[in-house]
Image: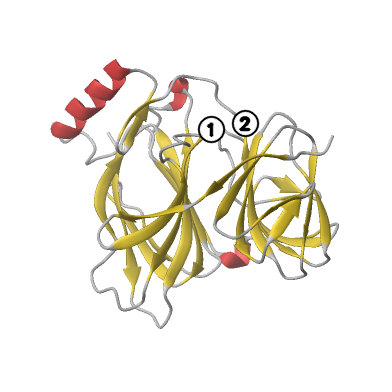
């Protein structure tokens, strides 16, 4: 059964971090969440932005995914993980019970351009130890499919699996370029799925949409996408958690009481070590 576009959301430009402009399509008014996804930003940071970036800040109860198109970002956290990701690289950080981290641009001759996705954790796993997976572009496989070429960060496509593993939401995260004017892509039935245009207009079952627009798909086992050869987009899908969401800034739990406890833990400095 082919999926169709259920809803379109144009990304909204807004300030975030220190001097950064993001284009947000999930985690804003009208689209506070898309189970299991909590936030989706396209970030743009000019190369001459000085000390702009995302200085130290805490997270608890979910996972953050950063994927770069251009420029370089340095990750550092209180657990001791550190690394720099550049064009085509990705990082998947499980905040779990609490972590403090930063993502700051590294000087280069390119603007910083990339994406950040927040993926929820079920209540039973919100307090697991933090984990950091850094994936080089050289470790991300390219999949040749029916009318498309995909760089596969997570999930399975065409019998190939991406390098990010052991994620509760069983996500599919692919950077896809059309090699023909029509492409056919499988998507796991029951998974929440969306497409986000990077370059060139797209259409699904007669519904056209431009870049910087989130196309939320209805259910089905596949999607047919049309566009010009070279059009590029992200296809992201994940298994819904179907649990309540209690949210306060960078903390996402399932009850208000858990949020209050999280704030107390933060105020007591309990995010500053892995114990």
Q: Number of callouts in the render?
A: 2
Percent of width and height locating residue 22 = 39, 57
Percent of width and height locating residue 48 = 31, 78
| Crowd around label 1: few <14 · some 14–19 · many ≥20 (10 Å) | many
In the depicted view, which residue is nearer to us: 65 or 22?
A: 22
| Crowd around label 2: few <14 · some 14–19 · many ≥20 (10 Å) | some
In the depicted view, which residue is nearer to us: 5 or 165?
A: 5
Mark 2: which secondary structure? Answer: loop
Point out the image quarter for the C terminus: top left
Q: Determine which quarter of the picture holds residue 126.
A: top left
For residue 62, the mark is none
Going 40% across and 83% down the picture, which residue do you hit?
109
Contact check, label 2 and label 1, Cβ < 8 Å: yes
In the depicted view, which residue is nearer to us: 79 or 172?
A: 172
Which residue extends farthest bottom?
A: 109
Give the residue at mark 2.
239
Q: CA distance from mark 2 to mark 1?
A: 7 Å
The colour style of the image is secondary structure
Figure check: 231 above or below 219: below
Percent of width and height locating residue 202 = 71, 58
Q: Determine which quarter of the picture holds residue 13.
A: bottom left
Figure check: 44 above or below 11: below
**Among numbered discs 2 and 1, the one appearing first in the sequence:** 1
Question: In the displayed structure, does residue 60 sit left or right of residue 32?
Answer: left
Going 24% across and 40% down the picture, which residue do you hit?
273
Mark 1: which secondary structure? Answer: loop
Instruction: Tell me if residue 133 can be seen.
Output: no
In the depicted view, which residue is nearer to us: 71 or 177?
A: 177
Give the residue at mark 1.
36
Point out the image quarter for the N terminus: top right
Question: In the displayed structure, does residue 227 sit left or right of residue 92?
Answer: right
Question: In the displayed structure, does residue 265 sit left or right of residue 77?
Answer: left
């Amino acid at each position: 059964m082919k999926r169709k576009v259920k809803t379109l959301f144009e990304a909204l430009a807004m300030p975030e971090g220190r001097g950064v402009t993001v284009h947000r399509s999930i985690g804003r008014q009208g689209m506070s969440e898309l189970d299991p996804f909590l936030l989706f930003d396209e970030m743009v940071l000019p190369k001459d932005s000085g000390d702009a970036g995302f200085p130290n800040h805490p997270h608890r109860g979910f996972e953050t995914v950063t994927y770069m198109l251009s420029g370089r970002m340095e990750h550092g956290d209180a657990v001791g993980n550190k690394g720099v990701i550049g064009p085509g690289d990705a990082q998947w950080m499980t905040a779990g019970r609490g972590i403090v981290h930063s993502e700051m641009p590294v000087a280069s001759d390119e603007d910083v351009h990339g994406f950040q996705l927040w993926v929820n954790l079920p209540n039973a796993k919100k307090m697991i130890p933090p984990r950091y997976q850094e994936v080089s572009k050289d470790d991300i496989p390219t999949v040749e499919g029916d009318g498309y070429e995909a760089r596969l960060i997570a999930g399975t496509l065409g019998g190939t699996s991406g390098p990010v593993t052991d994620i509760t939401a069983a996500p599919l995260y692919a950077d896809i370029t059309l090699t023909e004017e029509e492409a056919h892509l499988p998507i796991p039935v029951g998974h929440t799925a969306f497409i986000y245009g990077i370059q060139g207009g797209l259409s699904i079952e007669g519904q056209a949409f431009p870049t910087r627009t989130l196309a939320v798909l209805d259910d089905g086992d596949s999607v047919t996408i049309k566009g010009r050869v070279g059009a590029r987009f992200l296809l992201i899908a994940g298994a819904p958690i179907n649990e309540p969401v209690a949210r306060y800034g960078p903390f996402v739990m399932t009850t208000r009481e858990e949020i209050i406890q999280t704030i107390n833990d933060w105020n007591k400095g309990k995010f500053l070590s892995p114990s």
